[in-house]
Image: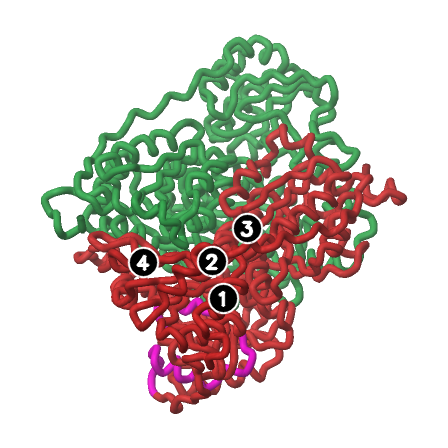
Chain colours: A red, B green
Amino acid sequence: MSDQDDTDQMNGADSLVQTLLDSGLDTCFTNPGTSEMHFVAALDHVPGMRSILVLQEGVATGAADGYYRMAGKPACTLLHLGPGLANGLSNLHNAKKAGSGVVNIVGEHAVTHIELDAPLTSDIEGIARPVSHWVHTSMSAADVGADAARAVQAANVAPGQVATLMLPSDTAWNGGGAVAPALEPAERPAFEAAALEEAVAALSGPDSLLLLGGAALSAEMLELAGRIAAKTGCKLLSEWANARQERGAGRVVVNRVPYPIDQALETLAPFKRIVLLGARAPIGFFAYPNKPAILTAEGTQITNLCTTAQDIAGALEALCGNVGAADTPPAHVAEAATPDKPSGPLEPGGIAQALARTIPEDAIIIDEAITTGRAFFPATAGAPKHTWVNNCGGSIGYGMPVAIGAAVACPDRKVMALIGDGSAMYTVQALWTMAREGLDITIVIFANRVYKILRGELTNVGVSNAGPKAMDMLSLDQPTLEFAQMAKSMGVEATQVTDCEALELAIETGLAHKGPYLIEAVM
Amino acid sequence: MSDQDDTDQMNGADSLVQTLLDSGLDTCFTNPGTSEMHFVAALDHVPGMRSILVLQEGVATGAADGYYRMAGKPACTLLHLGPGLANGLSNLHNAKKAGSGVVNIVGEHAVTHIELDAPLTSDIEGIARPVSHWVHTSMSAADVGADAARAVQAANVAPGQVATLMLPSDTAWNGGGAVAPALEPAERPAFEAAALEEAVAALSGPDSLLLLGGAALSAEMLELAGRIAAKTGCKLLSEWANARQERGAGRVVVNRVPYPIDQALETLAPFKRIVLLGARAPIGFFAYPNKPAILTAEGTQITNLCTTAQDIAGALEALCGNVGAADTPPAHVAEAATPDKPSGPLEPGGIAQALARTIPEDAIIIDEAITTGRAFFPATAGAPKHTWVNNCGGSIGYGMPVAIGAAVACPDRKVMALIGDGSAMYTVQALWTMAREGLDITIVIFANRVYKILRGELTNVGVSNAGPKAMDMLSLDQPTLEFAQMAKSMGVEATQVTDCEALELAIETGLAHKGPYLIEAVM
């Protein structure tokens, strides 16, 4: 039955939108198609859902990831059938690895239409499953509300999960929809209390490491970690990639385990005892010939006190208390520091100085700067308080979409997206949505015009004789990508810089600008 | 063991590339990462494979689809782990529905690394399966060659299949690789000979229809269909979407079943008997409330003589002979026709005239013009001989990547890509690869600045009261996408036109241009 035939009954789509709202969701990143038209129509019938249009679905799923990291609650996506979900899959992979809660609503053919194998028919559940913790297809309009409430509940399981709900078009347009009440979110499971004593004993002196991840990287938790370090002399590190880490002057400094395999091995070699708190035992990002996959030295004692899904606050408080550090002033608190004004051609050190000088209080830094960005983290420790966001799933093209989600979640904070040129091109359509929504995002594209990380990896994996065809596959300079021009073509103000002074000025201009601003930093 | 440790043994990557070459493949569309570096290095060791770099994997898989349609043999793709495959998934969906053979080589972590659940670890086989006919993971360097030969064999199963081979990095870098000989391609299965008599009886008079698809749309097969129509008085139609249809002056005209549901029902209503030859029984692209999903009138007799996978040439020859049409001159042969020069603002009719006046002999037309393009097909029937290519899977963003593959397969033919503005943005990164490879593609973007098809579909699915929020989700005009500027930013020459005269001139300029040329047609 059609929408207008049955005005006294709520249809499935309206019950879906109202249930999502009642479950606390109010933001939808969308690229809809025919099978989602009733959901789109419901956005008018049911007030309260902010809908943000994107031009490619990877932008929607990445934005939902960024939104969760900063808002602490899921957004929903609205995607068109299996192929629409497929386009969003790689950023759902990243969201899953980051522990971000996302509720995907994926249109599906009417139940009776699926068996006909129309052109857009596909195994949507099959496409969803590798990146989803929870997958379900609604079978009637009456089920849609309750299914949606369960999807939100699944997405809210700590630290955050990907829930994918398929909405056959007839379940959207049929009457009989029923709004479902919000379901109680699950509590975080307790930490490994049995490991507490071992953890207390393990943390003594500089050959012991407290390795932090997940929710342990909030400002409050970092302060507890700083107290523990002060009391026990242990070192602090965080994982290479973190969904969200609070930093800046006045906060406890925690550096990351390096990405390059040899540096990672060297950093971790001194530690005889490691306590994991919201982090996993360090392993190589990739396997390399003749190099270990386990990054810790042989014989290192590893104590897993708390996974990223468990009660991290409880674990840190217990650990802090049991080492007797509850009243110890924290160690490694960053002092405010402004580096000298950099000058000359753009190189990682000078760029890091320019960033450290310009990061504003409460900024959100989305870091997808890859090789250029390795110098940024230590250099910016003394900048004003800010949040640092990494790619936890390794699928590049996450940065600009995640910046959208962060900016939507935190309209009063400035977002800086630091993006390699190779990375930028996977989801460059994000620029249009930034302009459309007037989001305060300053994007810096590091245009070294090469997949530079892969040049290094060629050697790491044992290729010593790469020839011209191989090098050509890692080069982005024929033709040159003109990012400032590309940004303008999608409605984003932009400029190009080639030295450190101009970069610093351009960042200041971008931050003062209302709406997005792109800086192409030609290296 | 590493590449250089073991110079007397061939590694798995080299055996893979040599086996692909020996099996007849010579083109690879790639976006590699760390786990594929040995394959990349092998491109230098093993001469003969043309490798084409893309900036997003949907371009690689779409290009492989277009290549198969025009070259009649598969290309391979080289994709980075699960997320790289995921980015290419929607165009693999389209390739699968088009019956295009594709060999995907997907990097995977070293076998010993997978269990560690590194950031980029995912269920790659799970991601591959919904869009692949054949999925396999190589387990050792010694297996890689034989696995690759089987992948090519699977891709060549008629009409063409998607084969996905995972290559763990240690199977690429280890020694012990062995080149495998090409495997014999499977024969097309015979057509339904038992249905031949019924098909002969069915085709009599204008209330009978011969519905063609797949390989039945080659110039030679269309001529047989034209003879049958002349002899029996039956009508000829092709499916709405066809992988490749030959047309133009001197060829048998076969129009397509319309996309809009009401037009499709009207077109098919007169037929009492339908013979399927490489085509499927017509069904709705989507389900619509209160409208049938089966597009043929109730009681229509449907005779399935030959599927798209079976021996279409044998079926058409037998049918032609058995109706006694072997020597009958074909009906419906298009006469050369040049419409009047169009003028005034851009609208579908005038655009179709401009196309009909400019399509060069042997052109390949990639049609993703969606709403604007519905007028193009009939209007261009009398243009010089050309090939028309449709999207068979319905996932938009197929056009520009498929144009790349067609241009690579047919360097001596002009390619025209007719693309809606909404469609263009899904895989706009394709422009850079067109410029990099200097491909002779004239791209026309129809900038109506709206997802126009969805405006129509809102009504079709029964939404009569769409409000401003719904309409906003279907609009692309805030901000305006400046396609000419965007093209230039990726190294593609471009212009903007707003009337029919300028469009015709711009198409002529584009066709005379060496390399890609983009025309933004503002409607």
Residue A146 in the image: above or below residue B232: below
* Residue at the (56%, 34%) spot, across then down: B334
Query: What residue would you read off at disc 2?
Result: A306
Q: Which quarter of the rendered picture does the N terminus of chain A lie within?
A: top right
Helix, strand or loop at mark 3: strand
How far is disc 1 from disc 4 in space, using C-alphas?
19 Å
Q: Chain of mark 1?
A: A
Q: Nearer the viewer, residue B52 or A68?
A: A68
Q: Specify the label residue A316 is tagged with.
A: 1
**Residue A469: x and y, percent?**
25, 55
A313 inside magenta stretch: no
- Viewer can see residue A366: no
The answer to whether the residues at label 2 and label 1 have Cβ atoms under 8 Å apart is yes
Q: Which quarter of the rendered picture does the C terminus of chain A lie within?
A: bottom left
* Residue at the (20%, 35%) spot, across then down: B179
Magenta span? A344-372
Q: Is residue B295 left or right of residue B511?
A: right
A363 inside magenta stretch: yes
For discs 3 and 2, the disc positioned in front in the rendered view: 2
Whether callout 3 and callout 2 share a subunit is answered: no
Whether callout 2 and callout 1 share a subunit is answered: yes
